[in-house]
Amino acid sequence: MNEPNLSDWQADVLREVGNIGAGHAAMALSTLLQSEVRMSVTSARICQFDEIPDVIGGAEAVIVAVFLRMSGDLSGNMMFLLSLASAKQLINHLLPGEEAEDFTELEMSALGEVGNILGGSYLNALSLLTSLRLQQSVPAVAIDMAGAVLDIGILMAGEVADSAVLIHTSIWQGTTNIDGHFFLLPDPDSGMPLLQALGNRDE
């Protein structure tokens, strides 16, 4: 993905991937939380890999990251990134009760399941709109500075393309709004096929 610019059609398909995925994820999260959850995609675009820390508050910002590996017709990494405050808000809804300063193993597992739901929903939407066959791995969760999180992502893949798909997601439950960022980082040999798939659908 040396060229991060999208055609209008590719951008529309990418936004539709986000919207369909958000709809499916909202239903799954509503079942998990046993209360109504709404989700929306405020933006979906291609961003440069080294732009990711700026999107989430800077390289030294401490964040929660859920990692998943994509395989099938395309390969790459997926990351769902949350600020610590947003992650705590989400945990309060998933596991209401006493708040601890550090995340417990159960809380980390719950965050991983949210990332798993989002990843699966977005991949299913991408498969639906592009006819690509895609699967995802079991999620892994980390808490660290944004710069270190990206280093972990590179280590997991060995090598990543210089651009990523960014889907900015807002999750509402009642009056609570939780913002998160979902990134799809294709492997170098999957970046161009992804762009081609986004642009190869009939009107």
Image (cartoon, helix red, strand yellow):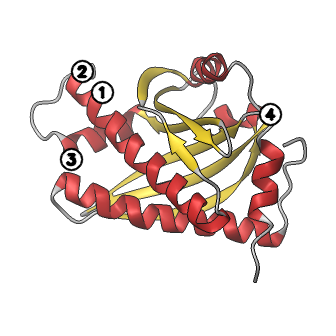
Mark 4 or mark 1: whose residue is earlier in sequence: 1
Provide the residue designation for mark 3: 93
User: How crowded is the residue under tag 3: few (<14 C-alpha within 10 Å), some, or many (20+)?
Assistant: few
Q: Amino acid at mark 3?
A: His
- Rounded to the nearest angstrom, the CA distance separating label 1 from label 3 is 14 Å
Left or right for 159, reference 81: right
Q: Residue at x 42, y 31 (%)?
A: 139
Which mark lies nearer to you, 2 or 3? 2
Mark 2 or mark 3: whose residue is earlier in sequence: 3
Q: Amino acid at mark 2?
A: Glu
Q: Residue furthest bottom?
A: 203
Which mark lies nearer to you, 4 or 1? 4
- Rounded to the nearest angstrom, the CA distance separating label 4 from label 2 is 34 Å
State the quadrant of the N terminus. Answer: top right
> Where 38 sits versus 55, above or below?
below
- Rounded to the nearest angstrom, the CA distance separating label 4 from label 1 is 30 Å
Provide the residue designation for mark 4: 188
Q: Residue at x 63, y 30 (%)?
A: 58
Q: What is the x, y in percent for residue 46?
A: 74, 51
In this rendered view, identify the residue nearer to me: 61 or 27.
27
Provide the residue designation for mark 2: 105
User: How crowded is the residue under tag 1: few (<14 C-alpha within 10 Å), some, or many (20+)?
Assistant: some
In this rendered view, identify the residue nearer to me: 66 or 177.
66
> Where 3 sits versus 176, above or below?
above
Q: What is the x, y in percent for residue 3?
A: 90, 47
State the quadrant of the C terminus. Answer: bottom right
Label 1, secondary structure: give it: helix
Provide the residue designation for mark 1: 108
- Rounded to the nearest angstrom, the CA distance separating label 4 from label 3 is 38 Å
Q: Are marks 2 and 1 in contact (CB under 8 Å)?
A: yes
Q: Are marks 4 and 3 in contact (CB under 8 Å)?
A: no
